[in-house]
Amino acid sequence: MHPNPNRWATPRGAFGLVVFVLCLVGLLLVYLAGDDGKDSPGAGRVTNTSPGTGRDTVPVDRVVDGDTAKVYYEGRSQYVRYIGIDTPESVKPDSPVECFGEQATEANAGLIEGEDVRLVFGPERRDRFGRLLAYVYVSDLMVNAELLRLGYAETLTIPPNDARSEQFDRLEGQARKADLGQWGPAGGCS
């Protein structure tokens, strides 16, 4: 007696469905393996990442000082230093809080705390300390420029991330002329 050749055969349609389901399960497992749950809950809230374009929208972890924040980027909390500006120090180790440092930190917090921010990178993406370097946006508002405009920051031009230096110089000059923030009577320290 000759065995039935179709006895162990699976219909082509069912076989294709099994392969498709197994592929989906495999992709799901790969996706879940990338999220080990060790990061803070906000780490999964990245709303738009576009590697290579120099623009990423990420949730803010916390405000560090007037020109630095921690954001959830590439799956972990990382420092981002704002390109083109400098604010008085408020958290520098072994140093006192500088005049107007707390106000600059509060101004930064008022702009970004609890927000998703868009990072736009310059030619140099990180500084020598490993911090991200970026122009920081909340919606269409560039935080770097707003801190200058309100007198909480002064310009700090470091090539090659200097594309906005003329705009930033102009904003600082306007804030100085108008006696805003650290340039006004309330900003002076004795």
Image (tube, rainbow, N blue to C red):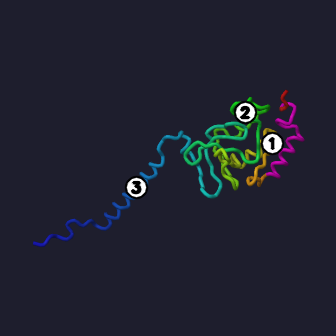
**Quarter the N terminus occupies:** bottom left
Kindly report the distance in space between the C-alpha atoms of the residues bearing marks 3 and 2.
49 Å
Circle 3: residue type: Gly
**Label 2 belongs to which residue?**
90
The answer to which image quadrant residue 72 occupies is top right
Which amino acid, mark 1? Glu
Mainly helix, strand or loop, the magenta region?
A: helix
- Residue, x 71% and y 40% (percent of image)? 111
Residue 99, given in percent of the width and then of the height, sits at: 79, 31
Where does the magenta region start and end?
165-186
Q: Which residue is drawn at the image coordinates 21% and 69% (left, top)?
A: 6
Dot 1 falls on a residue whose secondary structure is: strand
Q: CA distance from mark 2 to mark 1?
A: 15 Å
Question: With respect to residue 107, does 162 lie above or below?
Answer: below
Q: Is residue 180 magenta?
A: yes
Tag shown at residue 154: 1
Q: Amino acid at mark 2?
A: Ser
Quarter of the image for the C terminus: give it.
Answer: top right
For this orientation, the residue located farthest to the top is 190
State which mark lies toward you, 3 or 2. 2
Instruction: Provide the residue designation for mark 3.
Output: 26
> Which is nearer the eye, 13 or 85?
85
Q: Are marks 2 and 1 in contact (CB under 8 Å)?
A: no
Question: Residue 21, which numbered label?
Answer: none
